[in-house]
Image (spheres, rainbow, N blue to C red):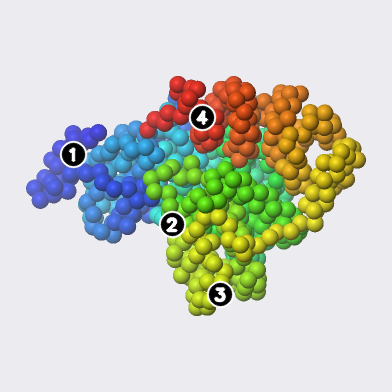
Amino acid sequence: MGRYLPALLSILVLGACSKKQQEVVTPPTSVTDYSYARFDEVAVTHMDMDLTVDFDNQKISGTATFDLDNKAGANVVHFDTWALRILDVTRDGKTASWSLGDSVAILGRPLSVAILPETQHVTVTYETGPDARGVQWLSPAQTLGKKSPYVYTQSQSYHARSWVPCQDAPANRFTYTARVHVPEGLLATMSASNPTEKNAEGVYQFEMKQPIPSYLLALAVGDIEFREIGPRTGVFSEPGMVDKAAAEFSDLEKMMEAAEAMLGPYQWGRYDVLVLPPSFPFGGMENPRLTFATPVLIAGDKSLVSVIVHELAHSWSGNLVTNATWNDFWLNEGFTTYFERRLDEVLYGREYMEMQALLGKRDLDLDFEEYGADNQDMALKLTLGDRDVEEIPTTAAYEKGYLFLRLLEESFGREKFDPFLREYFDTHAFQTMTTERFVTYMKEKLFEGNEALYTELTVDDWIYKPGLPENSPQPKSARFDQVDAQIAAFNKGTKAARLKTEGWTSNEWQRFLDNLPQPVSTARLTDLEDTFHFETMNAVIQRSWFPNVIAAKYEAAYPALEQFLLSIGRRYLLRPVYLKLAETPQGLEWARGVYAKARPGYHSITQQGIDEVLKWDEVATDGGTQPQ
Ligand code: BES
Ligand code: ZN
């Protein structure tokens, strides 16, 4: 819908005939990597936001002012938007003509603004729509404290455009500043320098000095408190959890030291973690300076902190050297999983690391089973086309990416591979990277032109073909061998109390529960549960426990299962449980009943994942509809 009045006005203001043509605003006709932005022509280099968070109307509104680098002398700049209401646009303080193009699924609508080659700034006044998919509004009941509402954003992969107009593609970087107005008694936090205390005015200032891609823009507002952990680290969460969170993450400073020793100086100043309410759809999200994390990590025994190690590692792989397109996603996640494991080894020992690697390998095998090992989505380099990146299975990016880098490590030795990695990150800091450029760099710096070795390691198969090549590294864990011996004993009839489980951690329990024969009899499940009480253990163990419950139709555990499905929001924990339920008609029906209650509380990303598993569009009239 074009707005022609402003266009006419600006022609009048400009006067000179020769400039009239510059006021025609044409939306872009093609799309690159899910974005309408043509940042190779006009790039945003800085964004300044002045935002008001209105909980009563569930709206974020305000202005976004962009500094432009008009490399091509273009007369139009394009931004991505999704379900945004655009109220006004100015350029260098004067009314500008603009148009909002047609809405396209996933992409939303391009906002095109007429500029002059010399235009420095564009300011967009806007408000979010009621269905902003990158924003989750939580009622007080959905928080721990139950007293205040909460809102947070999740911008990866292309949801930033649903809460602020932007050039929403990973290949463009910009710095940002923000002023955020929130109701009294609430604290605002962002992926930037953060306040640590509430103020009476409810106005907070933010600055991100390092250039970042749009998917790392983040905002959270709620009854949030801060606790310091070390000189550069701390934790934010609701008051009722902040001390427990500080204890759980007391290794943060050590993690940073280990990461810097491997990857070079941390470039972002502080590293804090924000623990969100349970509906947060991920384990963690690497928003720079402020990782967002699920509260299920607060397990009481540090058993799930490797998720934080992972998000911290993204401060290099992803945030410093960024995948140029979502087809290169493995450059973010495969490298990060590799660093996560290397740091786990330093922090928690080789055995711990190997157990994590084996659990990751199982997730990879499950994806091979579900989607087919020969499915092209099981290649490292993806070919997404116009598919929604969030509907693509991702374990290959993480775990096959990990195994590939481990293969290089084992082939070249750490004395050669580690300096190679370090130099790669130093050389490409604050840049984007494609798979092809990484391959060229690796051929030159690591293989040093040794084509025979490159061929022998089947590097191109690893990167461009689906499945797992035969030379894949094989993680080994003595502790898992011991678990496997106990599974064998269980299979021969050994009672739960006689199994040798002393000293088992979360990892061993997952291994055990993931590999029990299917189904276990209800009598034996009762014996296991009465002896070990899985339902009081952490949520990752429960993710492995409940599929056993479902396979055995062990009804005594269904109330706990229902509670799990209602109280957890992390997609990774929920999906295998719903998948198991969906295997039988009765299970599917029961799951749909619970899901009807749980779905409104889930984040749209989790809803999307579970809708697909339960074929929710067959059940609900409003299911899966995505307004733009
Ligand atoms: N960046 C990802 C989360 C993500 C991926 C968001 C794709 C949107 C699209 C984050 O770093 C991540 O990988 N989280 C994992 C952590 C785990 C692998 C340790 C998660 O949430 O499960
Ligand atoms: Zn990650």
Q: Which mark identifies residue 324?
A: 2
Element type at mark 2: loop
In this view, the residue in front, 188 or 456, is 456
> Which of the marked residues, 1 or 4, is nearer the chain's N terminus?
1
The residue that label 1 is drawn on is 7
Which residue is depicted at the point 72% across and 61% down?
346
Type of the residue with mark 2: Ala
Whether pointer 4 and pointer 2 mark residues with C-beta atoms closer than 8 Å, the reply is: no
Residue 65 is situated, as x and y percent measured from the top left of the image, at 35, 45
In this view, the residue in front, 224 or 248, is 248
The residue that label 4 is drawn on is 615
275 in relation to 596, above or below? below
Mark 3 or 2: in front is: 3
The residue that label 3 is drawn on is 453
> Which of the marked residues, 3 or 2, is nearer the chain's N terminus?
2
Type of the residue with mark 1: Ala
Residue 268 in view here: no
Type of the residue with mark 4: Lys
> Which of the marked residues, 1 or 3, is nearer the chain's N terminus?
1
Residue 23 is situated, as x and y percent measured from the top left of the image, at 18, 45
Residue 488 in view here: yes
